[in-house]
Image (tube, rainbow, N blue to C red):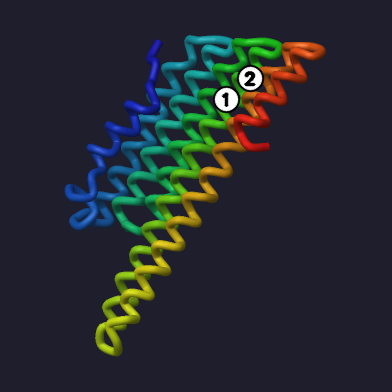
């Protein structure tokens, strides 16, 4: 059985589709060739799952699909580089991690499974929140650079205003991400309390609320 590690896959793809190697020189034909290679590799990886059964097979298929989705998103991000394309590639990684993690949760039962699913969702929230922060930061930096360049022809103080606005946007983005992560982590902690009862459960939930500012 082939066991694919999504994190290792993401790193490998990052090397294969490095911007310096591909983004500036990739032709349409080369792009199509890479696209076909990704599809072919997915078929091979998925076929390797056919000899498996049950949840082991489901995990294998999820890993194969996740690998394909990451590779396609990375290819797009390097063929036509943009803040949006890079964001979508990061989201594809988060989705791939989540899909595999949730499938693995099916091997559990009861509260253990519920906690497992909450943890998988929390991890995804963390990754996407980081991706959102990065996208907003990149957009703010790009806007500040353009505004600063234009402003210098008019008045240097406007350049400072643009940079201040960019800093404010980045700070807001980090705050939003922190709130989303904290809420996701609270959901995990609260789920873990469900296995308890009575005063012990109440204290568990109370402690979780205090810890995560709920």
Count residues near mark 1 (Cα–Cα under 10 Å), then give few for <14, some for 14-19, many for 20+. Answer: many
Indicate the quadrant where residue 112 lies: top right
Counting from the top left corner in percent of width and height, residue 111 is at 69, 14
**Residue 111 shows which numbered tag?**
none
Task: Relative to 137, say whether 189 is above or below.
Answer: above
User: Along the line of sight, which residue is nearer the eye, 214 or 169?
Assistant: 214
Q: Is residue 131 left or right of residue 107?
A: left
Mark 1 and mark 2 residues within 8 Å of each other at the beta carbon = yes
Count residues near mark 2 (Cα–Cα under 10 Å), then give few for <14, some for 14-19, many for 20+. Answer: many
Q: Residue at x 39, y 16 (%)?
A: 3
Counting from the top left corner in percent of width and height, residue 19 is at 23, 49
Q: Of helix, strand and loop, which one carries label 1?
A: helix
Indicate the quadrant where residue 41 lies: top left
Residue found at the far right of this picture: 198
Q: Of helix, strand and loop, which one carries label 2?
A: helix
Q: Residue at x 52, y 12 (%)?
A: 56
Task: Relative to 106, say whether 180 is above or below.
Answer: below
User: Along the line of sight, which residue is nearer the eye, 187 or 4?
Assistant: 187
Counting from the top left corner in percent of width and height, residue 161 is at 38, 75
Indicate the quadrant where residue 196 lies: top right
Real-space Cα distance between discs 1 and 2?
6 Å
**Residue 115 shows which numbered tag?**
2
Residue carrying label 1: 119
């Amino acid at each position: 059985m082939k066991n694919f590690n999504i994190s290792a896959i993401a790193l490998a793809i990052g090397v294969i589709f490095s911007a310096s190697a591909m983004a500036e020189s990739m032709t349409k034909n080369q792009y199509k060739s890479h696209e076909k290679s990704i599809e072919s590799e997915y078929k091979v990886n998925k076929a390797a799952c056919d000899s498996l059964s049950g949840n082991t097979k489901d995990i294998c298929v999820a890993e194969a699909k996740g690998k394909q989705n990451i590779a396609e998103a990375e290819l797009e991000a390097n063929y036509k580089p943009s803040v949006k394309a890079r964001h979508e590639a990061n989201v594809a990684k988060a989705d791939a991690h989540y899909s595999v993690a949730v499938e693995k949760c099916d091997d559990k039962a009861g509260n253990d499974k519920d906690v497992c699913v909450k943890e998988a969702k929390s991890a995804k929230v963390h990754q996407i929140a980081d991706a959102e922060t990065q996208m907003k930061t990149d957009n703010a930096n790009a806007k500040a650079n353009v505004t600063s360049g234009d402003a210098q022809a008019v008045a240097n103080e406007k350049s400072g205003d643009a940079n201040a606005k960019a800093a404010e946007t980045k700070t807001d983005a980090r705050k939003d991400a922190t709130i989303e992560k904290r809420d996701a982590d609270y959901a995990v902690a609260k789920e873990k309390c469900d296995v308890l009862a009575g005063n012990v459960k109440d204290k568990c939930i109370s402690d979780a609320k205090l810890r995560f500012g709920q």
